[in-house]
Image (spheres, helix red, strand yellow):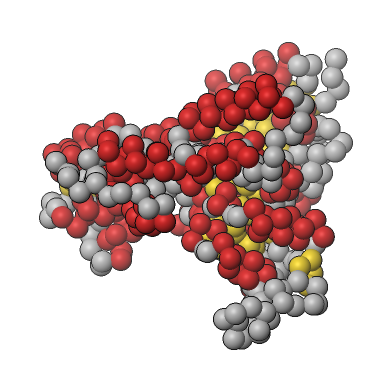
Amino acid sequence: MNDKTILVADDDKAIRTVLSRALAREGYDVRLASNASTLWRWVANGEGDLVISDVMMPDENGLDMLIRIKKIRPELPVIVMSAQNTLMTAVKAADRGAYEYLPKPFDLDELKVVVKKGLSPKNKLGVLAEVENEEEMPLIGRSPAMQDVYRVMARLMNTDLTVMITGETGTGKELVAKALHDFGKRRNAPFVAINMAAIPKELIESELFGHEKGAFTGAVSKNIGRFEQAKGGTLFLDEIGDMPMEAQTRLLRVLQEGEYTAVGGTRPVKVDVRIIAATHRNLKLLVEQGLFREDLFYRLNVVPINLPPLRDRKDDIPDLARHFFNKYAEENKQTPKLMDRKALDALREHNWPGNIRELENMVQRLAALYVEEVISFDNVTAELSSAPEVKNSEGELSAHGGFLDETLQQSIHRHLKKYFDAHHGDELPPNGLYSRILSELEIPLIELSLHATRGNQIKAAELLGLNRNTLRKKIKELKIPIIKDRF
């Protein structure tokens, strides 16, 4: 028999009953309250070893009461439940000292685990930056998939742990990184972002660590790198999967040693930044193929956050659409448009391969092109049918250049490994073997795509998952004949 007492406060009798029975079976003494005043009386009298409280109660907001509880009994673990499943709720709960936040409906088995951990003498309470307005929060969505994201974020905001954010293009990875910075303890210092895919590989080290005047041809003046620009704050390494191997080695050394030296410099500089990285690629696959350092992967992947694609959180589409209509109206000094139910249903039925970014573009078109105050089903279907086809990004978690389908990559990798094992026994494959063979597949893949699209480079680029300009550059570099007879 457990000697611990759990205080439960919720104005929903059904929830009180379910919690009472589940926790009693675990051996706890459970006391039930339907309002905040009864719970407060028990807490003020020193009763209870753990509290489970709803946020919305008839006489007081549970988050406001949480502040009072922490003042008189800071060691008392409080688990907050809420049907208001937003990032704001998760952040406020953690900010005000909650041990854990659970969105409703909750999983009983998960609750039991949280209760057990909360009663452990090793439980820790977090403190975050105070947040007051829902409008301040950059992420929107109440779906279960987003609840998992919010809860992880709430735990991480007041730490310096390195975070790896993964997810398809357009899911909001930079918004998550910015929120972790803006509502964490480094919020008063700079947030500096750098996109690895947008910088020539020969300039990445200079961009990250800076360079001295005369360090290389063209270095006519001293350059301050992103590490120094972000001093005391957060450095966001976007599209980390596109970082060249040489730069990966340098970054790993900096993370290990906690200091760096500018290109052409001699004075080491201490690192004082929080690292948050992001990628739409499958880094584990890149590691297997020798395209990404395994040791760097583990240095960066301390705490992973995976953002769900919009097709897996379609219940969030109405809230997102409303937000984008309001945003467009504010920017253009107009009255926000509304959507009828059938129009919203049409948005839900679309697969959104471009994710939230595609949805925002759609809303902007609807707001700009239609004079009606209420957007109709016909308006939405007309725009969906006329919109340019967007390549589904499910296959984006790819390795070489972002255009090999992941299943194809895995198949090639297996066959290469099988071949090498059969011919070379236990020897390690030569460094970069898989990478070199993959690179040799570029020409036939591009040629096949061009033939399949009858020479249409725009469609071929979409098929390969490449930017059109990138494809044109590759065609020129690899001297691939241009198909002129398009029909």
Point out residue 11 in the picture as x, y percentages from the top left corner: 55, 30
Residue at image location 74% in from the left, 24% down from the top: 425
Point out residue 296 in the picture as x, y percentages from the top left corner: 71, 48
Dividing the picture into quarters, in which one does residue 394 lie? Answer: top left
Quarter of the image with the N terminus in it? top right
Dividing the picture into quarters, in which one does residue 276 lie? Answer: bottom right
Quarter of the image with the C terminus in it? top left
> Is residue 301 or residue 97 the one in the foreground?
301
> Is residue 259 or residue 347 the one in the foreground?
259
Residue at image location 76% in from the left, 16% down from the top: 26
Residue at image location 76% in from the left, 52% down from the top: 71
Q: How many discs mark residues in the rendered view?
A: 0
Point out residue 323 in the picture as x, y percentages from the top left corner: 36, 51
Residue at image location 63% in from the left, 23% down from the top: 418
Residue 174 vs 429, above or below: the answer is below
Residue 249 vs 53, above or below: the answer is below
Dividing the picture into quarters, in which one does residue 428 lie? Answer: top right
> Is residue 63 or residue 406 the one in the foreground?
406
Q: Is residue 47 visible?
A: yes
Judge left or right: residue 444 versus residue 221. Answer: left
Judge left or right: residue 352 versus residue 24. Answer: left
Point out residue 446 in the picture as x, y percentages from the top left corner: 37, 42
> Is residue 38 or residue 219 the one in the foreground?
219
